[in-house]
Structure formats: C-alpha cells, structure tokens
Amino acid sequence: MRFYLLEHAPHPRYSGYYTYGHKWGLPGVHCSECNATWATTGPAYPSVDLSHLSAQEQKKYLPRVEEDLAEFERLREQVRPLVPPGVDLRPGTAFGPLIGSAQGEFGPLVLVHAWELLMKREPLERLQAEGLRGLKGCRTELRFRKKNPPELLEMELLPRGVFHPDCLPERGPPPCPKCGRRSFNRPEEPILDGATLPQDLDLFRLAGIIGTERFVKAVQRLGYEQDLAFRELPVG
C-alpha cells in the first residue's frame, strides 16, 4: 500500500482561516531535571469532554505551564480513561472542540494547520460511504461573523506508525528520565517503517497527517482536493 503526507496546496482555491485552539488540554511542563519547558503541538482528541469536571479542575486543563510533574501526571491519568487506548498523552495534548474565530470561505476539506484536518459534513459522509476507515468527525465551536456559517468537523486522528531508522539520526540524546522529553524533529525526507503502519486506517497521524492511497484516490475522484497536496512517502 502507498502512503501520502497531506500538505497545503501551493495555490489554494479557498481563503478560509481560523485561529487555533481547543477547549481543554494537558498543560505544558517545566522539568527541573532537564530544565526544559515544553509541550507538543498537534495531538488532539476533540471527542473528549471534560465538562463533568468541576470548574476549578477544568481550569487546570487551560493553556499554562505546570511546574509539578506529579500534578501533571495526576491530570494525565484523570483523562486517560476518556481517550483511545494506548495513545501517548504528552504535555500539550488537546481535548474537546476546536474553538476560536473563523473567517473566509472554506472548501470541502480544510488543512489550515498541517496537523489538523477539518471537513464539511457532506464530504465526510461521502468519504465514509466509500468505505474509508478512520474518519471520525467531531463538532467544532468556531465563531463566524456571518449568517449561515458552514458546519466544520474536526477529524480525530489516531497516532500510528514510526519512521524507518534509515531516515533518523544515528545518535540522539536519550529522553529525559524525569519528564520523558526527547529532542526530535520530523526528518526532511521521511521514510515510513512499513512493519508499523496500520492496516485498518486510511487516515492517521505521524508527525503530520498521513493518508493511504485509498484515501487519496477517493478524495480526488470526488473532487475534494482543491486545498490539499499529497506527497508520497517511501516505505522501508
């Protein structure tokens, strides 16, 4: 099977844009061991609802930095039963609906930010009818300054796969023994490790959004690729 990285189209047809952010998220952390203050960007589980928590507890899931790693671990374990099994809940992981302001016109599939894919309802339902797997749309709470705003749904993408060792540095610093941070950037010329890629998903996350050949062909056949570009990634 062939796999493709979803990227911005060089000449997009639509001008839609929105500010980035989710209703809740794990805080960033400051580690006394490695002295790093850090959080990830991208991993999000918009179906996770934290409204059952007290208002005081919900405030702990707003953007901020947590100095106490024990408290961070408590917050992480509190939400772990709500997320898909086995996912890595790193600092900065987002939860709940996408919030913020939006403007302009949006196409059927929206990739304003490279780590976040939105779809209108009809295109999502047509792609699901094509038998594509891994397309879970979650409501957003984006604010438009116009009548009859579009309904945009955020895809909840599961993390799957790893990069092949051939495209990674031979040596790198070990992860911090206390906070787990490891300095790592996506390779400029990524190679996917074929043995780790999912066989049951046509759309997933791996330091970016990856779609299978089945996904790409369906999007192109239905005419939804206006604001997307697809870069095939080698598999080793």
Image (tube, grey):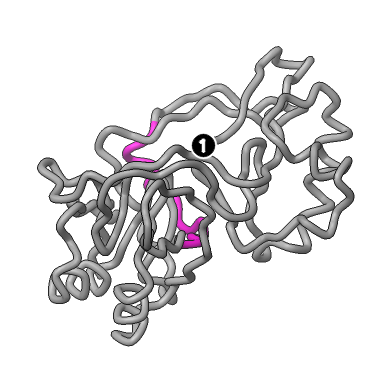
Left or right: where does residue 95 sit relative to residue 213? Answer: right
Identify which residue, 96 or 28, lies in the foreground: 96
Q: Residue at x 64, y 51 (%)?
A: 95
Q: Residue at x 77, y 16 (%)?
A: 33
Q: Residue furthest top?
A: 35
Identify which residue, 125 or 34, lies in the foreground: 125
Q: Residue furthest front?
A: 147
Q: Is residue 163 magenta?
A: yes
Residue 99 rendering spot, x and y as whole percentages: 54, 47
Left or right: where does residue 86 sit relative to residue 150? Answer: right
Q: Is residue 188 magenta?
A: no
Query: Which stretch did the figure color magenta?
Result: 155-168
Up/down of 173 relative to 87, above or below:
above
Up/down of 52 relative to 30, above or below:
below
- Quadrant containing the N terminus is bottom left
Q: Secondary structure at mark 1?
A: loop
- Quadrant containing the C terminus is bottom left
Check disc 1 and report the residue beneath it. Answer: 41
- Please tell me how many numbered marks the rendered image carries: 1
Hey, which quadrant is residue 106 in on the image?
bottom left
Identify which residue, 147 or 37, lies in the foreground: 147
Q: Residue at x 78, y 26 (%)?
A: 66
Label 1 crowding class (10 Å Cα cut-off): few <14, some 14-19, many 20+? Answer: few
Left or right: where does residue 67 sit relative to residue 142? Answer: right
Residue 117 rendering spot, x and y as whole percentages: 38, 55
